[in-house]
Image (tube, rainbow, N blue to C red):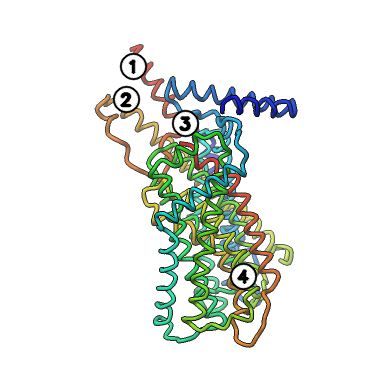
Amino acid sequence: MSAQRESQVAAAQRESQVAAAQRESQVAGASREGELSLGAGAPAGALRAGEGTPAPTVPLRRAVGALLRKELLVELRTLESVPGMSLFALSTFVVFHFALNRNSVEGDLATGVLWVTLLFASLLGVNRLFVADAEEGGVDGFLLAPVDRSAMLIAKELTLLCYLVVLELVAVPAFALLLSVPMAHALPDLLLVLALADVGVAVVGTLVAALAVQTRARDLLGPLLGLPLLVPIVIGAARATSPLLVAGHAGTPAARWLAMLALYDLIFGLIAYAVFDFLLED
Amino acid sequence: MYGRGLRALSISTVVAVVAALTLVFFYAPLEAEQGFLQKIFYLHVPLAIIALCGFVVGGLFAIGYLRTRDQRWDFRSYVVIHMSLIFALATLITGSIWAKGSWGHWWVWSEPTLVSFLIVFLLYATYQPLRFSIEDPERQARYASVFAVTAGAFVPANFIAVRLATEFLHPRVLGSTSNLPGSMALTFLVSLVAWALLFVTLCKYELTAKHTRFQLRALRRRLSGEQARDTPPRRSAAPQHPAGTAKLGARVADGGAST
């Protein structure tokens, strides 16, 4: 294993002189950090994040695949998040039926019911996303592995995305049945809006979950941080959905809302990629 | 170290604020439609601009912290965001008063800037609880910096989103300085400078006061010996160990050894 790793590092060094020099300085930084933490017990304050990490030797795709498989396996065995989220969504529809005193909803009202329910149900999943890793030492184990730290971010985002898809497979049909929402004619458009919004919720939710999980008030801070950050997604998704949920009116979502959702996904994807490494340094 | 130039800055702030208020009340003409009420514009808009810039600057300081791991950057980021939060609250209150006066409602959802501001305010209101609920000072600084960077980037993104979502029911008469008459533009610019100076001065005061308090605490701990050092410091959302405390402690220790 170590021979393989060395040969890979050597191959990477042959690729270009500049990259090799950078990698050497990173290795030097890593050993310096090790000395510091062994000697004075001082955190490597002068070193930047990333310099201390050894050159990743496992390709990102394999690392993400392994992590994603682990997450989904854990979820399949414990069934901690997804059933809870789905059940919460169903209960919320019942609550909305009584709170609004309506047997059927459509248009703006239906959009509001759908997005409030999906948002709060997804916050349940966000709150639990890193808890098992933080409590059982999964993060420490991950940090010991010679992989890029962004692998954790991408794997968690994909995990949350899977949770959201399953949640919506349950919640959206239930929504249509329980509150007799006319949506059959606009299903493809609705799926597009849901997909774009899910990506945004997954990206923002992962970042928020990673921020909140190390705090004492994690159950409180997750939603408090998440809701304002998710408001633009709700704006875009709700505006795009509302013409779709009107009976007999085959409206299409305005392109600018879809573009806004996609742009927001992109911006927060980049932000999360830039700052996530700093959350995994313990 | 933070107190240098504080007196000159304070005096110039007082002069600028007095000049701005004089211009607002005695020089700027009454607006034709809104009359006297419009003068809140010279307070509300500068406060809003400064608060938003403060949030973004706090994010930039946080980037400085994440790059250098120098506690002073986190300290500055904390103070700037703290002060911006106060200015943002003042913006919301003055905006609300203006909305009541000109449109008859305390809160107007069709005014995109006001709504964006509320969302940004709600987001930054979680900054202090986030800091407060992380005990380890290094981790507190790191997580707060990550939050500040994310939220700093969220500020412009959120403004674009809310502005897109709002149909312009009310014409934006005072959207920018370009369509203002000269005397109003001058008053506005002087007000902007005055309130910006106030912001900087208040930030400097807070930096100085907090820094002095840390130094004092370090000295006390030195004087009362090991016993007091064991008691943990009161938990706080403010950064715990800005640079200088350790140096000062060492200096006192040297002085004690030589005498």
Residue B41 picture quarter = bottom right
Q: Which residue is mark 1?
A: B256
Q: Nearer the viewer, mark 4 or mark 1?
A: 4
What amino acid type is highlighted by mark number 3? Answer: Ala
Q: Residue placed at 63% from the left, 59% from the top?
A: A264
Question: Quick check: marks 3 and 1 in contact, CB under 8 Å?
Answer: no
Tell which circle, 2 or 3, labels the residue nearer the N-terminal end.
2
Q: CA distance from mark 4 to mark 1?
A: 73 Å
Q: Which residue is mark 3?
A: B243
Q: Which residue is mark 4?
A: A191
Label 4 Cα crowd, 10 Å radius (few <14 / some 14-19 / many 20+): few
Label 1 Cα crowd, 10 Å radius (few <14 / some 14-19 / many 20+): few
Q: CA distance from mark 2 to mark 1?
A: 10 Å
- The chain letter for the residue carrying disc 1 is B
Label 3 Cα crowd, 10 Å radius (few <14 / some 14-19 / many 20+): some
Q: CA distance from mark 2 to mark 3?
A: 17 Å
Q: Do pointers 4 and 1 mark residues of a single chain?
A: no
Q: Which residue is mark 2?
A: B222
> Can residue B14 be seen in this snapshot?
no
What amino acid type is highlighted by mark number 1? Answer: Gly
Q: Position of residue B6 (x, y in %)?
A: 51, 39
Q: Position of residue B213 (x, y in %)?
A: 38, 36
What amino acid type is highlighted by mark number 4? Answer: Leu
Q: Residue placed at 44% from the left, 26% from the top?
A: A42
Which type of secondary structure does the marked residue at label 3 adopt? Answer: loop
- The chain letter for the residue carrying disc 4 is A
What amino acid type is highlighted by mark number 2? Answer: Arg
Nearer to the camera, A40 or B11: A40
Question: Quick check: marks 2 and 1 in contact, CB under 8 Å?
Answer: yes
Which type of secondary structure does the marked residue at label 1 adopt? Answer: helix
